[in-house]
Image (cartoon, rainbow, N blue to C red):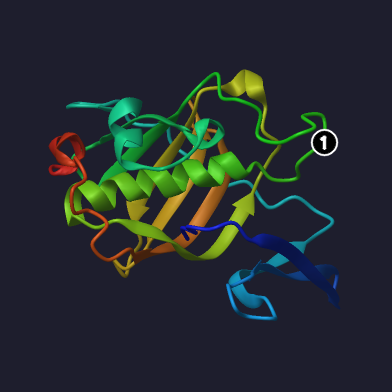
Amino acid sequence: MIWSSARRLKLTARFKQQGEQMLAQCALISERQLKGKPDPVISTAFKATVRLDRQESDAVNGDKPPASTGPILEAPDVYEVYFHGPAYQVLGSAWGNGSGMVIGQMADSLPANHEPVNRPLTIAPRLIELCFQTAGMYELGVDDRFGLPSRISRIQRFQDVDPSAMPFFSVVRHNENGHGFDAQVVDQSGEVYMQLSNYRTAELPGAVNGLNTEPIKAVFRSA
């Protein structure tokens, strides 16, 4: 979602017990004051259910990220098109493997994700963003479509992020119904850190007009 004006954001969570698990019904809500309106306009941007369990998710098998056998998309061509600030320019490079799989390598030397930097995170948001942007490059290069995040059926976290395991890779492919993407975040040995199921985007109409997408198409038209 792209906002063109400043607004106040509020994150809410309502908890309820379900068996041995705790569910958190979360929502990201925005408030915007319009000129001439006495009350702010309130809208819900996203909703999600966070499932809290006492046990880690069972590990899944992953594969080493396939090396490129063709051209590679580099970060300057990505962020000539994308609008992200320095901390979320997470895609260092990306390529296809010729069978519908797209691989994105995470950029190194990124600025801090949040302040203060010593506050812990349960899940690494930039690994999710790495999957978003890798899938987005596929859509721009193959479908000539600028998609923004719309929904994810499920995110699974399997282990803590170990900085010494860098670089991380997103391995993204269309799911079985062809209407969304499934993705895994792995290290260079194939160890799985996170898995996204049925990630879908909403097209931003007309957004590709005037964008230089030729470097992206050159890499992904045969992905």
Left or right: 62 as drawn, with respect to 154: left
Measuring 29% from the left and 56% from the top, which residue is drawn there? Answer: 146
In this rendering, the answer to whether 107 lies above or below 61 is: above
Left or right: 173 as drawn, with respect to 190: left
Measuring 32% from the left and 63% from the top, which residue is drawn there? Answer: 204
**Crowdedness of circle 1 by 10 Å Cα count: few (<14), some, many (20+)?**
few
Relative image position of residue 41 (x, y in whole percent): 62, 77
Q: Please, what is the three-letter code of the amino acid marked with disc 1?
A: Arg
| Front residue of 150 and 32 | 32
Relative image position of residue 69 (x, y in whole percent): 20, 26
Relative image position of residue 17 (x, y in whole percent): 86, 75
Q: Quadrant of residue 176?
A: bottom left
In this rendering, the answer to whether 165 lies above or below 135 is: above
Residue lying furthest front in this view? 36
Q: Is residue 23 visible to us here?
A: no
| Front residue of 176 and 122 | 122
The C terminus lies in quadrant: top left
Q: Is residue 173 visible to us here?
A: yes
Count of numbered circles on the image: 1
Left or right: 64 as drawn, with respect to 140: right
Measuring 65% from the left and 34% from the top, which residue is drawn there? Answer: 113
Measuring 42% from the left and 56% from the top, which residue is drawn there? Answer: 182
Q: Which residue is mark 1?
A: 119
Could you tell me which secondary element the residue under label 1 belongs to?
loop
Relative image position of residue 3 (x, y in whole percent): 49, 59
Q: Quadrant of residue 21?
A: bottom right
| Front residue of 148 and 196 | 148
